Image (cartoon, rainbow, N blue to C red):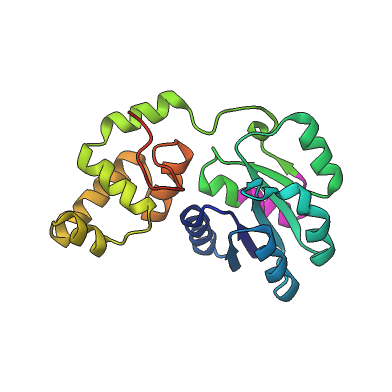
Amino acid sequence: MKVVVCDDHAVFADSLALVLAEAGHDVVGVVYSPDEALRLLSSAPADVCLIDLQFPGGSALDRLPELLRTAPATRFVVLSGSMDAELLDAALAGGVCGFAHKGQQADEIVAMLDRVHAGEVVVDSAAGTRMPLRPRSEAQRLAHYLTPREREVLTRLVRGESTASLARTMKITRSTARSHVQSVLTKLGVHSQREAVIAAARYGLVSVNTGEWLLS
C-alpha cells in the first residue's frame, strides 16, 4: 500500500510514517500542509492519504474537493482529536473514507488504513464524539512514573534529537543516554523512539509544536 502522511506536526508525522514503513507499507512522502499534499499527489499517486483535520490555514475538509480532483484514486483518511456528528456526516458525504482518532495507538491507525485500502469506509468510534485527545488520568499516571531526567529525555525525543544529541546536550555518556531512553520506552509501554513520540502526543505529555513538557 502506498501512503502519504500529511500533518503540520513534523515530528509526529515523521514518526507515524516510520511506523507505517516498518509495517511494510510504501510511504510515498510526508508533507506538512494540504498544499504540499496536492503537489505530491499530482506527481506521486498514493493508495491512501492520512491527513490531519486542522492546519494553521484552516480545515483539511475545505481542501477535500481539490484533493479528490487531483488524486481521484486515493482514499483519504482524516486524523482528528474530535469530530462532531454533523461534520462527520458532511465529510463522509464529501468523499472521506475514514476517520482515525489521535488517541489511537499507532498500530490501530495502521490497521485502519489497511481496511480503508481494502475498500471499507472506517470511522473510529472516538472520532464521532468530542472525546479529549488523551485520557487525563492515564497521562498523569505516566507522568508520575517518569523521573525529571526521563521527562527531559522524552521532550528531547519529541524535538527530534538523536541519542548522540541527547548525550551531548545533557552532558552524559551515550551509554547513559541509551539507558535513559530505554527506561522511557519501558515506562510508556512502547518499543521504539518513534512510538515514544507518538505516545507523548497521544497522552498530551509533550507539545509536538514546541517540545515542551505539558503536565505540572
What residue is shown at x 86% (from left), y 43% (from top)? 93
What residue is shown at x 64% (from left), y 63% (from top)? 3
**Magenta range:** 111-121
Give the left or right position of residue 164, taking residue 194 as reference.
left
Q: Is residue 146 magenta?
A: no
Residue lying furthest bottom: 43
User: Magenta residues: mostly which secondary structure?
Assistant: helix
Q: Is residue 78 above or below residue 142?
A: below
In the depicted view, which residue is nearer to us: 36 or 127? 36
What residue is shown at x 26% (from left), y 36% (from top)? 146
Question: Looking at the image, can residue 36 be seen?
Answer: yes
In the depicted view, which residue is nearer to us: 78 or 60? 60
Question: Looking at the image, can residue 1 be seen?
Answer: no
Q: Is residue 187 above or below residue 32?
A: above
Question: Which quadrant of the rendered structure holds the C terminus?
Answer: top left
> Where is residue 105 drawn, in percent x and y?
51, 43
Residue lying furthest front: 57
Q: Is residue 185 above or below residue 1?
A: above
In the depicted view, which residue is nearer to us: 210 or 77? 210
> Where is residue 33 drawn, in percent x and y?
63, 58
Give the left or right position of residue 172, taking residue 38 as reference.
left
Question: How many labels were placed on the picture?
Answer: 0
> Where is residue 102 drawn, in percent x and y?
56, 41
Q: Quadrant of residue 43?
A: bottom right
Q: Is residue 74 above or below residue 42?
A: above
Question: Which quadrant of the rendered structure holds the N terminus?
Answer: bottom right
Give the left or right position of residue 207, taking residue 130 as reference.
left
> Where is residue 89 drawn, in percent x and y?
82, 36
